[in-house]
Image (cartoon, rainbow, N blue to C red):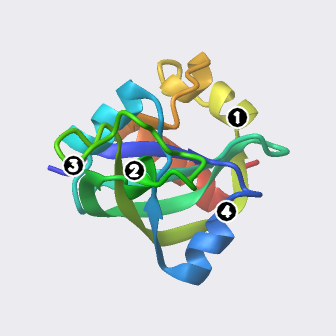
């Protein structure tokens, strides 16, 4: 059964519009062990994604994507020229992982963090409880509530 995720991206770095234009992209540069473990061990093709714009005005869910490729080693960790270089990464211990995501849908308006906080049924959702993880699991119920808000254009 597919899982649900919330993936955070700053829209100035890579927005839902960029994903819509490109169709698919890599989700690299995650440098938190818990988020890495989700990418390495749990995210699978077909999983559903809430695409969240962080450090935005307003921050919130901008649309939907799907996991297109399961976790695989992030080559940036081995590239000394990369901002994501990790000198401890090796062929035998890549340390950091990435996934590929594919565009699914852009909402008419961003479902703001404030709207998420006010929506019944989302009280335990990680993103509204000050989780800073860039990769977060989402329950089926939470996913459906956010999709409904997004398709209604609730900001």
Spatial separation of the CA atoms under disc 4 and disc 3: 31 Å
Number of numbered discs overlaid on the protein picture: 4
The residue labelled by disc 3 is 91
Tell me where residue 35 sits by quadrant: top left
Q: Nearer the viewer, residue 150 or 127?
A: 127
To which residue does mark 4 refer?
A: 15
Q: Which mark, residue 113?
A: 1
Q: Residue at x 52, y 37 (%)?
A: 134
Tell me whether circle 1 and circle 3 mark residues in contact (CB < 8 Å). no
Q: Which mark's residue is nearer the viewer, 4 or 3? A: 3
Q: Is residue 146 left or right of residue 26?
A: right
Residue 120 in view (yes/no): no
Q: Is residue 118 above or below residue 124?
A: below
Q: Looking at the image, do the residues carrying marks 1 and 2 touch, with CB atoms under 8 Å apart? A: no
Residue 14 image offset from top left, x and y in percent? 65, 61
Residue under the point 27% across and 43% down: 90
Q: Earlier in the sequence, mark 1 or mark 4?
A: 4
Q: CA distance from mark 1 to mark 4?
A: 16 Å
Q: Position of residue 149 (x, y in %)?
A: 60, 49
Q: Callout 3: helix, strand or loop?
A: loop
Which circle marks residue 78 in the picture? Answer: 2
First in residue order: circle 1 vs circle 3: 3
Position above or below: 45 against 142 = below
Q: Which mark is residue 28?
A: none
Residue ID at (58%, 77%): 20
Q: Could you tell whether 63 is left or right of 45 in the image?
A: right
Q: Along the polypeptide, which appears first: circle 2 or circle 3?
A: 2
């Amino acid at each position: 059964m597919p899982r649900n995720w919330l993936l955070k991206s700053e829209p100035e770095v890579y927005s839902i519009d960029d994903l819509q234009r490109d169709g698919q992209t890599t989700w690299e540069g995650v440098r938190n062990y818990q988020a890495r473990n989700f990418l390495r061990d749990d995210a699978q093709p077909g999983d559903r994604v809430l695409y969240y714009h962080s450090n935005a005005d307003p921050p919130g869910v901008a649309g939907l994507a799907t996991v297109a490729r399961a976790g695989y080693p992030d080559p940036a960790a081995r590239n000394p020229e990369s901002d994501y270089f990790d000198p401890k990464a090796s062929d035998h211990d890549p340390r950091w992982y990435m996934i590929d995501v594919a565009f699914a849908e852009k909402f008419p308006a961003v479902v703001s963090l404030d709207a998420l906080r006010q929506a019944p049924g989302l009280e335990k959702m990680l993103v509204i409880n000050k989780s800073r993880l860039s990769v977060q699991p989402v329950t089926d119920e939470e996913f459906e509530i956010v999709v409904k808000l997004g398709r209604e254009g609730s900001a």
